[in-house]
Image (spheres, coloured by chain):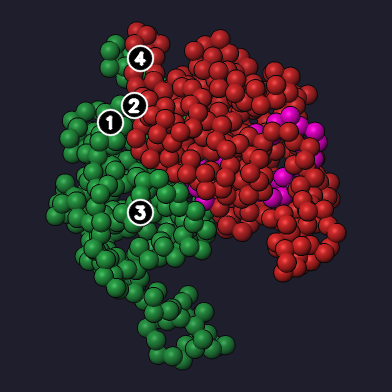
Chain colours: A red, B green
Amino acid sequence: MSKACKSCSSANASGGCSSGHDPKTCGTKPEDEKIASTLKRIKHKIVVLSGKGGVGKSTVATNIAMGLAMAGKKVGLLDVDIHGPSIPRLLSLGDAKPHIEPDHMEPVPYNSNLFVMSLGFLIPDKETAVIWRGPMKLGLIKQFVRDVSWGDLDYLVTDCPPGTGDEPLAVLQTFGPEAQAVIVTTPQGVAVDDVRRSVTFCNQLENPVLGIVENMSGFVCPNCKTTHDIFNSGGGEALAREMNVPFLGRVPMDPEVVRSGDEGYPFLKVQGDTPTGQALAKILGPILALDA
Amino acid sequence: MSKACKSCSSANASGGCSSGHDPKTCGTKPEDEKIASTLKRIKHKIVVLSGKGGVGKSTVATNIAMGLAMAGKKVGLLDVDIHGPSIPRLLSLGDAKPHIEPDHMEPVPYNSNLFVMSLGFLIPDKETAVIWRGPMKLGLIKQFVRDVSWGDLDYLVTDCPPGTGDEPLAVLQTFGPEAQAVIVTTPQGVAVDDVRRSVTFCNQLENPVLGIVENMSGFVCPNCKTTHDIFNSGGGEALAREMNVPFLGRVPMDPEVVRSGDEGYPFLKVQGDTPTGQALAKILGPILALDA
């Protein structure tokens, strides 16, 4: 009997299921079936996670999505960072509004390969503090998968809120064990402490970890070219070794990354030939290989 | 009729309260009375907030608490960052365990003036991912105020998790409108967007904002001494002006802050004479003035 059948009202004591349901969807509600049919059309689900905020998760997620789209893939970028939805700004889509129909929403097209959905599109103004309680958040996250017309995608890249709480749990539970995690950290010990818990979190939920990205790893002085490890160095790589997950690479600090984010043009698109751009491109390798 | 009386079962239609309760505690449960009696012994409640993670909130909270203790005040430092409790590491208290009695917990003494409580003290190991749901978090936060024997304090400095969700809401609701917020941001636009919502959040809850701290504001190359605005510059100060709240000051980036945090000695104690130490000390001025 499939896992789903166990919770179905037609399941019987001997372990059989008398309903004649498809075992894959047996025991699920209509809304779960809608989610399942949406997910079936998305080949690879990439979830960008971090135990700690402010490590550059949204920047990494945006640049992964952009890089995949530049490689000719059909890509969705889903921003479920409810308290700080920054993807619209990072892509100069701050004033965009998704087209909303009674039973579905259209994601906002960035170009012919990249489609975006974010709570940022739905908040009335930039000052509003969204005081969501847990259950509302879960509902919203499910809705973003269920009611958005993603269509056929090679990749859906999801930018999670930081931590190991309600929201990343809802994301991984909605996507199921197929979703693969990219975990972002900065090198300092205080960040690595939090991010270690993200790896355990994925293990507990049985979601594979594609690897760890060490962001803000060293700063090269633009004037004298010396390197300074402002947030220390090597913490992400050491954590990958310790937790036995792949290390995807180090991304050096670059004021241009911050500027490009604030001004809303994706760094990888315009600065791909810098050391930081090349580091971001290298991270794409194992993700592109999933669809080779 | 006091606000509390409105929800009391003894309140009558004409607006009076027939119970003879103290209007200040009328309508409250015994556990709320315990919280009220704890809070009565704490002169100033400082809550350190940010709409965005990774902006240095815990570092600012720790150094404010340390600075107040160094000025001779009795200080409690409460870490309610449930997913990433970093205060124990920042103070080299990683192996400390609070003394627990059936009806209360003793905070961990850092020295004779500074007492600390953090979820980090109660998590079994450094790998455990704490998958708390909303209501559990609220219970834990109330418990940290209700059941910790803080005693008589001049200040209780509380380090909140990022965002404007369940946890900061629970903290401000538990402390009430007396609690004053210190809001931390980094200068870049993407952070300021999130932090603007923190100011609105405090306004909605009618908690006064003591001011905004602009952290990671410029990096001075230790080699050639040129200044680089890695995360841009001035965003926190501009936000303070826009939202009509005080600006407490800019704290420059300094790799020593990261190192001192990872190694667990409070920066302000050992590096107080550096530009970053002086900037942190300046922020203390208006907070110390509350108890003058």
Secondary structure under tag 2 reads loop
- Residue B214: x percent and y percent? 39, 35
Name the secondary structure under disc 1: helix
Residue designated by label 4: A227
Q: Amino acid at mark 1?
A: Arg
In-image side of B246 versus A134 (left or right): left
Q: Magenta span has A148?
A: yes
Q: Which residues are magenta?
A: A141-165
Residue labelled with disc 3: B124
Q: Are marks 4 and 2 on the same chain?
A: yes
Question: Dot 1: few (<14), some (14–19), or many (≥20) neighbours within 10 Å?
Answer: some
- Disc 2 residue type (three-letter): Asn
- Quote the CA–CA distance across marks 3 and 2: 27 Å
Label 4: which secondary element: strand
CB of mark 2 within 8 Å of CB of mark 1? yes
Q: How far separated are the C-alphas under marks 4 and 2?
A: 11 Å
* Residue for badge 1: B259
